[in-house]
């Protein structure tokens, strides 16, 4: 195992030693893959000794940067994230157990590219971008375009995800993330739904983004459904209509966790609920995040 102290060194190690190497962040996916799924990396490059990859920063232009090695627990309890994007803090709090969240990183969740990754839908709904650094320089891609399929991203093997940036949001922004898994905790999402929109005083919705996890090879936006809500006054009936359309837009598979039909039905229910929950705190109701009971 190598422990480089700069991004350049880490990327160079992958280039010099050739295919078959893996980066290591928290190890909660990589170590399981090695121990239980037969993965045998030729070598491992630990990213944790590289300074500056782990922090949540608010910038003067209103954007927020989350370093790739920031843990789920740090996102879950970050005062800045809780204040600005409580649903994103909630999505991090939905990951595994507190032991897992103390190790698991945001960058690892993105780079591993599991369709059910809990933090991805909320970040995509927030229009986040991913900064990627490698031997050929650096690039920034919208997170919406980062995922290519299960376990696949736009990154080359020697490239490192260094940070996620959430651009400035409107003071009218509301949002929600709902993870559906019957075991309630310590389980991957059967369906994940993130919703964001700007809500005016008269309950008119704009800049609507609906992002689904675990119901397609990558997290996906439900654009037809977004268009139904865009510019409209929010009502329970409209939220139900958007939910029905979202159920049609998703592309779930049947697997050990759930049938495709069940997932599709749950997408409809969860989307409606997420849209209405997002507006709840503005209407004097307790938010889903505050109602959600977490035992560990
Ligand atoms: C018991 C258990 C429960 C879990 N529950 C959930 C859950 O509820 N929801 C959920 O979404 N996930 C869950 N996970 C999966 C896992 O915890 C997350 O995906 C986690 O965020 C991975 O981050 P990591 O830092 O541990 O990644 P690692 O295991 O270190 O790395 C994962 C992959 O990403 C690559 N990588 C890591 N960081 C970078 C980087 N900065 N640049 C380039 N490549 C990188 C590695 O090479 C590796 O291929 C669970 C895992 C376990 C073991």
Image: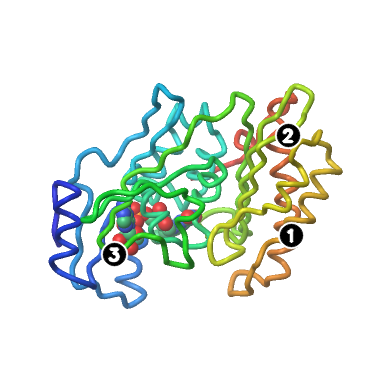
Secondary structure under tag 3 reads loop
Q: Gap between marks 2 and 3, in whole Å? A: 41 Å
Instruction: Give left or right: position of 146 versus 7.
Output: right
In the image, which disc is placed on residue 205? 2
Instruction: Give left or right: position of 226 versus 40.
Output: right
- Dot 2 surroundings within 10 Å: few (below 14), some, or many (20 or more)? many
Which numbered disc flags the more N-terminal residue, 2 or 3? 3
Question: Which residue matches tag 1?
Answer: 247
Q: Give residue 171's position: percent from left, percent from top.
A: 59, 24
- Dot 3 surroundings within 10 Å: few (below 14), some, or many (20 or more)? some
Q: Nearer the viewer, residue 289 or 209?
A: 209
Q: From the viewer's perspective, is the residue at label 2 or at label 1 nearer? A: 2
Residue at horizontal 25%, vertical 75%?
Answer: 40
Q: Gap between marks 3 and 1, in whole Å? A: 35 Å
Q: Give residue 240's position: percent from left, percent from top.
A: 82, 48
Question: Which residue matches tag 3?
Answer: 157
Residue 155 lies in what quarter of the image? bottom left
- Dot 1 surroundings within 10 Å: few (below 14), some, or many (20 or more)? many
Secondary structure under tag 2 reads strand
Residue at horizontal 54%, vertical 33%?
Answer: 85
Secondary structure under tag 1 reads helix
Residue at horizontal 62%, vertical 37%?
Answer: 175
Q: Are marks 2 and 1 in contact (CB under 8 Å)?
A: no
Identify the colour scheme used.
rainbow
Q: Gap between marks 2 and 1, in whole Å? A: 20 Å
* Residue 26 visible in the picture: no
């Amino acid at each position: 195992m190598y422990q480089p102290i700069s991004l350049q060194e880490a990327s160079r190690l992958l280039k010099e030693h050739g295919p078959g190497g893996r980066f290591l962040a928290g190890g909660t996916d990589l170590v399981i893959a090695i121990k239980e799924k037969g993965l045998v990396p030729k070598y491992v490059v630990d990213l944790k000794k590289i300074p500056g990859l782990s922090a949540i920063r608010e910038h003067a232009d209103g954007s927020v940067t989350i370093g790739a090695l920031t843990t789920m627990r740090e996102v879950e309890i970050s005062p800045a994230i809780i204040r600005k994007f409580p649903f994103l803090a909630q999505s991090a709090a939905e990951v595994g157990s507190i032991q897992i969240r103390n190790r698991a990183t945001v960058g690892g969740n993105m780079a591993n590219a599991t369709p059910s990754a809990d933090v991805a839908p909320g970040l995509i709904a927030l229009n986040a971008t991913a900064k990627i650094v490698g031997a050929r320089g650096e690039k920034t891609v919208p997170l919406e375009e980062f995922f290519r399929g299960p376990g696949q991203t736009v990154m080359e093997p020697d490239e490192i995800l260094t940070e996620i940036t959430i651009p400035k949001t409107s003071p009218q922004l509301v949002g929600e993330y709902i993870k559906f898994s019957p075991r309630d905790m310590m389980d991957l999402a059967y369906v994940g739904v993130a919703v964001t929109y700007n809500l005016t005083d008269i309950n008119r919705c704009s800049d609507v983004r609906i992002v689904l996890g675990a119901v397609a090879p990558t997290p996906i936006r439900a654009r037809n459904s977004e268009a139904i809500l865009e510019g409209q006054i929010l009502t329970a009936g409209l939220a139900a209509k958007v939910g029905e359309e979202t159920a049609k837009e998703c592309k779930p598979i049947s697997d050990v966790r759930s049938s495709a039909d069940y997932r599709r039905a749950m997408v409809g229910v969860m989307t409606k609920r997420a849209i209405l929950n997002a507006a709840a705190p503005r209407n004097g109701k307790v938010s889903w995040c505050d109602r959600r009971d977490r035992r560990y």
